[in-house]
């Protein structure tokens, strides 16, 4: 859910980019683990099969451990290392994510429309009849939205956006 939310607002809240050395199942070997904390989200990029957002469960002296397994070979097509982007997702957005998940669970049980013979009715809520979480939470998400930036362009240096 977190990755689809970040893609919807086109903002991954990237702070920095590091090169990953190795990976086995959930553990990523990396120099500089002091840059990571348990509970933080990271984005893996340049992998063969496992690009995406992951949550860190623990941090050791020479590796970070993710909360879910990654699949396949984590070298990209050229055989070089992959990148790990540190994400600094605001707490308010993580709380909003929880609300969206609750909304989606409630909507899964809701009736969108019904028909009885010649009579039919369609129920809607949210923005202009959009009953999806995207429509229902559009105004709350707008303050986090970025336009036309790629992930590579979202890295910050000393609080300012820099281009890699």
Image (cartoon, rainbow, N blue to C red):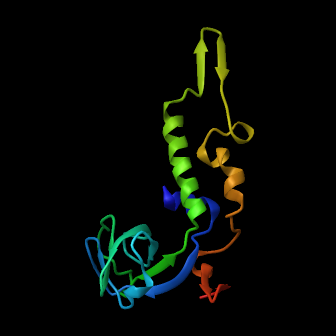
User: Residue 117, percent across and down?
Assistant: 60, 8
Taking 49 as reference, is 155 left or right?
Answer: right
- Residue for point 55% across, 48% down: 99
Q: Quadrant of residue 92?
A: bottom right
Residue 78 lies, with reference to residue 90, above or below; the image says below
Q: Residue furthest top?
A: 117
Q: Is residue 146 visible?
A: yes
User: Residue 138, percent across and down?
Assistant: 69, 51
Viewer-proximal residue, 27 or 163? Answer: 27
User: Residue 96, percent across and down?
Assistant: 58, 54
Residue 99 lies, with reference to residue 79, above or below; the image says above
User: Residue 12, percent across and down?
Assistant: 57, 70
How many circles with numbers are drawn on the protein? 0
Taking 87 as reference, is 145 left or right?
Answer: right
Q: Quadrant of the C terminus?
A: bottom right
Q: Is residue 7 visible?
A: no
Q: Quadrant of residue 57?
A: bottom left
Viewer-proximal residue, 137 or 132? Answer: 137
- Residue for point 49% across, 35% down: 108
- Residue for point 33% across, 87% down: 21
- Residue for point 68% across, 54% down: 140
């Amino acid at each position: 859910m977190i990755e689809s939310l970040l893609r919807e607002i086109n903002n991954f809240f990237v702070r920095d980019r590091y090169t990953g050395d190795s990976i086995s199942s959930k553990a990523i070997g990396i120099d500089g683990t002091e840059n990571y904390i348990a509970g933080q989200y990271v984005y893996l990029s340049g992998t063969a099969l496992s690009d995406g957002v992951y949550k860190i469960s623990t941090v050791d002296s020479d590796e970070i451990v993710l909360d879910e397994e990654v699949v396949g070979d984590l070298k990209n097509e050229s055989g070089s290392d992959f990148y790990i982007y540190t994400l600094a997702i605001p707490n308010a957005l993580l709380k909003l994510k929880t609300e969206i998940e609750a909304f989606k669970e409630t909507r899964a049980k809701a009736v969108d429309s019904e028909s009885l013979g010649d009579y039919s009715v369609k129920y809607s809520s949210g923005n202009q009849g959009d009953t999806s979480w995207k429509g229902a939470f559009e105004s709350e998400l707008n303050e986090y939205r970025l336009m036309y930036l790629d992930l590579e362009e979202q890295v910050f240096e000393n609080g300012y956006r820099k281009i890699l």
